[in-house]
Image (cartoon, rainbow, N blue to C red):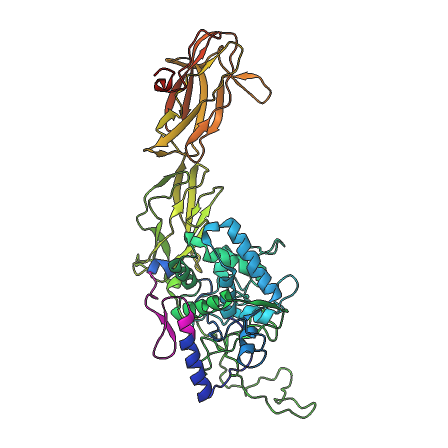
Amino acid sequence: MAAQFGRRLRKGAATTAVAAAAVAALSASQAPGVTVDGRGGQATADTTPAPEETADVGATGNSPYYTDLPPLNSPHPSPSASTGPGTAGRSEAGIPATVLDAYKKAEAALREAKPGCNLPWQLLAAIGKVESGQARGGRVDADGTTLSPIIGPQLDGNGFALIKDTDGGAYDGNSTYDNAVGPMQFIPSTWEWAGRDGNGDGRKDPNNIYDAALSAGHYLCRFGWDLSDRGDLRKAILSYNNSTDYLNTVLSWLEYYRKGTHEVPDGTGTLPVDRSDDHDRVRPTPSAPATSRPGSGSGSTPGKPAGSGSSPKPPTSPGTPSTPPTSPGTPSTPPGAPSTPPTTPTPPQTPTDTVDHLENAGTARLTARAGDVFDERIRARAETATGKAVAAVRIRFTVIGDTDTTFAGGESVATVVTNGSGVAVAPALRAGEKTGDVTVRATVVGRMVPGLDYRATVTERVADTLVRTGDAELICAPGGEFADRVEVRATHDGAAAGKVAATATLITSVDDATPNDKGPYFKDADGRAVRTLTGLETDENGLLKLPRLYADDTTGTFLLRVTTAGGAALTVELTVAPAGTTSPSPSADPSESPGA
């Protein structure tokens, strides 16, 4: 989780009573569904997520987080409340300037990229509060990068999730296990696909608040979730860290920040105190990440709660070594004594370590028209060398190649944990506009086994029916211009067929579809006569209005044929005759004529 900022405060009985009352009162002011259990902790009636909704270990690997709740008083205390209880509210409502700017920029970017997500910046602020205390109170430089890395405890299975190294220590400095990194606490394997460049410097840095905030926004907006919907909001937060207490803590801060906040100078933000893993117990101390510096990470030592360090040793006399030196070349044990070489603890085996290969779990050939959602979802099964299914393994599905086909929500990568049958089901695929074959590759996160490729085919949009939108006769004098333009509507299975490719040709006859060399014509950009138009496309409502038609000096009846992808066709008659030789259709109802 995030770094700790000092010793845990020891609360007396009076403080405990106040805290319990605060939680109870706060829950009453929060969003519907949040209650208080008998131990003063928040709970909800429907907090058990569906397996497919929160099967992944989340953005943070379910790392520890800060559990401090917002104060009960308003974020905007009255002017007379400059001291006393009101001061705490105003202090807590303050967000460091650069951090606040990053949240608001991320909201603006998502409003344009994924308008249906309705991401509020206050949600990013709430998550940033519980993950890192707003980047440790805004300790960032002018570009938004933290002054020292924020690295959570190593996820070694000792009170946390067990996630072995996936990045070679590139992000967290730990080549044995993964640690959550940065102000929004992404684990390396999630950052690898979710990371975004939020400050335009060409890099994706989890330690930069602009990059981390934008990445968190995209993460929360995947799967087509609408965060203005209470159910989708809960799913998104649980997908970040799969904990009911985490959900309720984030919702508490979300509601608090929605009531009001203000900007404070960088480095002066209020620091949280209590963490979800702070139980006055000492866990084994992992190796410090190579990238950490004094004062960085989760307290002075990653994974070790603040206040659990040993007492300082008494000083020794100047020049006196703390242990007697040995002569060069002299062994530290007497000659002949058995030596015990140091041993390195063997990391416990995870389900991922037992995976030998991936198998197709029944996915057939996938086909969908451009713009449609594929009916079938990709399924992969993790198996041991003997074919036994392996549960609780993270499978990453990646859409590869030059394609605009994505998973629902617009992401090209999704990570899903295998169920009890060893099967991971990818999110639904949505076909893009580029037709042809698309490859989706399944790989095991944290395990070097061959990937499994699935082939999906995107076919072009089609129409099965074409009709004119009007019935007026199309008549023109020789050498003139047709007054009306031809407009048609394309449908498929009775519904509007939008974005369907079409062609318009002035054909020789009903039985001869070759272009005519006389009669009506279109004009190209240079004003030259053309009798075949390609590259046409219906609009979103299935409508297609052709360019204006002109006539040469040849009189008679001519044919215009419009065809679409999918085989729909319509033939329209065009008449070229001297003025006065034809009678246009009446434009008024005969019953309204004089004398009727």
Decide: is 446 above or below 525.
Answer: below
Query: Does 318 sit left or right of 478 as displayed?
Result: right
Picture quadrant of residue 87: bottom right
Which residue corresponds to the image point at 36% horizontal and 17% vertical from the top-left?
Answer: 590
Q: State the image coordinates of residue 465 (x, y, percent, origin top left).
A: 35, 27
Q: Is residue 39 magenta?
A: yes
Which is nearer the eye, 332 or 120?
120
Which residue corresponds to the image point at 62% horizontal and 71% vertical from the top-left?
Answer: 267
Q: Is residue 206 magenta?
A: no
Which is nearer the eye, 430 or 56?
430
Q: State the image coordinates of residue 101 (x, y, percent, origin top left).
A: 59, 61
Which region is colored magenta? 26-50
Query: Does 382 sit left or right of 316 as displayed?
Result: left
Picture quadrant of residue 54: bottom left
Q: Is residue 187 visible?
A: no
**Residue farthest to the front, as pictured:** 595
Q: Is residue 12 visible?
A: yes
Which is nearer the eye, 300 or 565?
565
Query: Does 396 sit left or right of 141 as displayed?
Result: left
Decide: is 362 above or below 50.
Answer: above
**Residue farthest to the right, as pictured:** 318
Which residue corresponds to the image point at 36% horizontal and 43% vertical from the top-left?
Answer: 374
Q: State the image coordinates of residue 60 (x, y, percent, origin top left).
A: 47, 65
Q: Quadrant of the C terminus?
A: top left
All told, the count of numbered labels is: 0
- Look at the magenta stretch and give its main secondary structure: loop
Decide: is 292 above or below 568.
Answer: below
Q: State the image coordinates of residue 234 (x, y, percent, origin top left).
A: 40, 62
